[in-house]
Image (cartoon, rainbow, N blue to C red):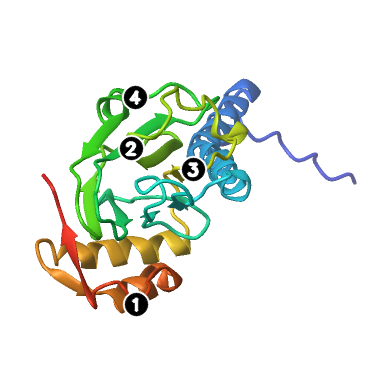
Amino acid sequence: MHANPMPNRPRSSSTARPPSQSRRRRVSGLAAGLVLLLPIALQVPTAQAQSDLRKSFPGRRVGGGTRGECSSRLLAHLVPASSVFAPGKTRYLGVLEGLSANPRPLELTFRPLSGRGTADASVASGQRRVLPASGPGITLFTLPAVKTPTVWESSYVCPEAASGPAPADPLNFVATESPPALSLLVTEASREDLAVQTALAKLKQSCGATVPRQEVGAAFGLSDLFTAQWPERIPVRCPS
């Protein structure tokens, strides 16, 4: 006696989906995953590119030369020793001016790093700024938000300086007798940047007052620039 064969059972609706529908679901899920990963993928090249700039940019945060009363005056950007700095949300920048018997105005210029795209309107509007002649001290100011690597160059407006166009590419910068202070502003902050941002924010609280020169030297690693001729306390200027 043979057992009756098992009758065919109807397939449930859950197992009867067309193969094409299943494939569509898998493709849709994969696309959603790629969308989530896209911002991360875009950030990695930007961070890597700025890391490379920190190693290769020929910055000089301390400017000035050895000839001429005006051009030899001490001038320093308050940035990390690498001369590359991310200003952060506060966008504070600072310069330290040295002793001088005949102070001259200070010219600040900002321009996109060559080969890194064109300047946006905010950077272009603040491309050049001239600070009035001042005695020794610190001057703080703000810059429109930096959206692309931007070269910051500072030098005194000296009567003995030869006029001429600024170098188009700081990577081809040729030193002169009185080189300007030269830094690069970026968007991705490093640990050193965060420390400088904090020090600048603290200085901002002393606008119109004075601060101990020793504190300034320690905060920015510039203690060796201060000689015995410097006053014990130096003014902090914050022009509008």
Q: Nearer the viewer, residue 117 or 47?
A: 117
Q: Inspect this view and state whether residue 185 appears.
A: no
Q: CA distance from mark 1 to mark 4?
A: 44 Å
Considering only vertical position in the picture, is 36 above or below 112?
below
> Which numbered marker is on residue 179?
3
Mark 2 residue type: Cys
For this view, does 168 lie left or right of residue 91?
right
In which quadrant of the rendered view does residue 58 lie?
top right
Residues 207 and 157: in front is 157
Quadrant containing the C terminus in the rendered view: top left
> Is 206 situated left or right of 172 in this image?
left
Q: Nearer the viewer, mark 3 or mark 1?
A: 1
Query: Disc 4 to disc 3, how far (Cα)?
Result: 27 Å
| Residue designated by label 4 | 120
In the image, what residue occupies the spot 58% across and 35% down? 173
Choose mark 4 or mark 3, whichever is in front. 3
Closer to the observer: label 1 or label 4? 1
- The x, y position of residue 202, in whole percent, is 22, 68
Circle number at residue 158: 2
Residue 41 relative to residue 106: left or right? right
Gap between marks 2 and 4 measured at Cα? 30 Å
